[in-house]
Image: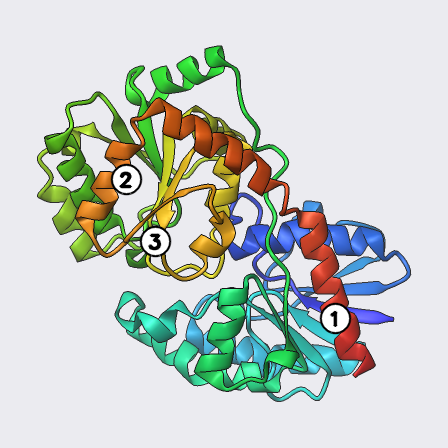
Amino acid sequence: MKIAVNARLLLKDKLEGIGWVEFETLRRIVKSHPEVEFYFIFDRHPDPMFLFADNVKPVVLFPQARHPFLFIWFFEFSVVKALKRLQPDLLFSPDGYLSLRSKVTQVTQFHDLNFEHFPKDMPKIHLWHYKRYFPKFARKAKRIVTVSEFSKQDIVDCYGIEPEKIDVAYNGVNEKFAPISDEEQEAIRAKYTGGQPYYMFVGSLHPRKNLARLFTAFDLFKSQTPSNVKLLIVGEKRWWSESIEQAYSSMRFKDEVVFAGRLSAEDLHKVTAAAMASVYVSYFEGFGIPILEAFKCETPVITSNVTSMPEVADDAALLVDPFSEASIAEGMTEMLDENLRETLIAKGRERAQDFSWDNAADGIWNCLMKAIKE
């Protein structure tokens, strides 16, 4: 059997979101099925670390697909030509994109349809591409795999896809995320926040991550509740918008906000494990891996009561209204209660056991096999 895989997001030192999901699931699938020939399709020469086993053969195509017009060129011409040459039994695309002109059986993985609900958060050229092509990708796919029951229903509602065509494979969490000693926690706090306790946010600094309201809510929390708790922001300012900047600039307590930038997986693990709580109040998520990362680190979580986040957190997190700064601030105040934190830590530890990358990889593999048999 030959399976081609769109692996263009496997980039050394640049794995984010979907790239991490690809890394964790594909390496397990490849190693579990040595009888299959995998052709990983890249848009640049890959790092050898992404050729997970001897049954993986790299295929490098032109151009580097990082712009909507180049996406079209890459998937509708370069990939089509490569598939004709390779003659695979199936193409799997973990980032949602497909080749509309190819007759090869294709399976795609949709992570969320945030652009359908909050189009203003997306640059216009990217929004045009997503709105034009993703409904077509959904119809073109033999099967779709997604990361939550919420996301599955969203695909059904937005694109009219029959639910029987969609499989759910929950994401997992990196094995490195685990509790750290009190001494290590003290060292992390000394490094990032001058030894003070902190709430943390991790993610791309994108409007839908709700940073503007988070900043306003933290200001409200600090003004209403005297405490030495700081706010540590982990992530790159690649999508930093005018609304986020305005909210930050207007803060009374902006000196209590610390920007750590992008961190390695090792440093992110330690920062998460040393946090007083993780505050993940995005207003739209297809899954929400940082929730699980905090659970694994035995760090309590404040998260949103919308989209997939209640599904992932269950009763192990403090749920707040992401559209209400007062609700977020109230959650921060409640999280000062040590008894509440201990209760949530225990529930989070138990909830985290329901998710693993092994299960995610198995779910994706089962979806691929259904597509081939159909």
- What kind of element bears circle 2? helix
* Amino acid found under the numbered disc labelled 1: Leu
Asked whether the viewer can see residue 51, the reply is: no
Comparing marks 3 and 2, which lies closer to the viewer?
2
Q: CA distance from mark 2 to mark 1?
A: 41 Å
Q: CA distance from mark 3 to mark 2?
A: 14 Å
Please name the residue that numbered disc 3 is placed on: 282
Q: Where does the N terminus fall, quadrant-wise?
A: bottom right
Relative to 296, residue 287 above or below: below
Relative to 361, residue 4 above or below: below
Residue 227 sits in quarter: top left
> Residue 368 got which mark?
1
Residue 235 sits in quarter: top left
Q: Residues within 10 Å of mark 1 (few under 14, many from 20)?
A: many
- Residue 266: image location, x then y, percent: 54, 30
Q: Residue at x 37, y 32 (%)?
A: 277
Comparing marks 1 and 3, which lies closer to the viewer?
3
Q: Earlier in the sequence, mark 1 or mark 3?
A: 3
